[in-house]
Amino acid sequence: MSSRLLEALKEIKRIRDEIDRIDNEVAELLESLTRGFTVPIYEFVVARFFEIPIPQHVELCQVVKSDVDDERFELAIGLPGVSKEDVKITYYPDRGVLKIRGFRKYDGREINCVFTIPNDVKPESVKAFMKDGLLVLTGERSIRKYEIKIE
């Protein structure tokens, strides 16, 4: 193998390692920004960091209340003009991701949101109810805390 080819392969490996390092740093940063909080990820990451305009037919969720403690979480989202029949909620417990998709019939706008919630929320405990354009989600957490005594 020629020395030029060997040097090129080493440079490719160095670049791949650097890309992996940056990718891990970005993932850690996003996780630290959203850990334990309910954040509209699409708006925060895409619209702010990458300055990509949000399509006009898509509307982002309006967080009315976000409350997380050691035992539960509560999230209230304003979805004016959307009926509960036009809302789909998907929870991915292994990633702590909650997706909400809705459709407002009178103006044809989609409402799309992705939130992070603590990934220790018990999937069977997540409940949702909707009244007067306000979607409220609640769930219990299964945090295990242990106090360690110093000997």
Image (cartoon, grey):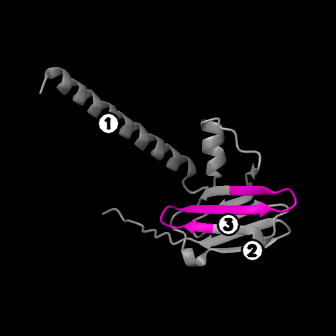
Q: Check disc 3 and give the amino acid type.
A: Glu
Quarter placement of the C terminus: bottom left
Q: Check disc 1 and give the amino acid type.
A: Asp
Task: Judge the density around disc 2: few (<14), some (14-19), many (≥20) Cα neighbours within 10 Å.
Answer: few
Residue at mark 3 = 74
Q: Is 133 or 117 nearer to us in this picture?
A: 133
Residue 95 in the image, given as x and y percentages of width and height:
50, 61
Question: Mark 1 falls on what kind of element?
Answer: helix
Q: Is residue 54 magenta?
A: no
Task: Judge the density around disc 3: few (<14), some (14-19), many (≥20) Cα neighbours within 10 Å.
Answer: some
The quarter holding residue 89 reads bottom right
Q: Check disc 2 and give the amino acid type.
A: Phe
Residue at mark 2 = 129
Residue at mark 1 = 17
Q: Is residue 101 magenta?
A: yes
Magenta segment: 90-112
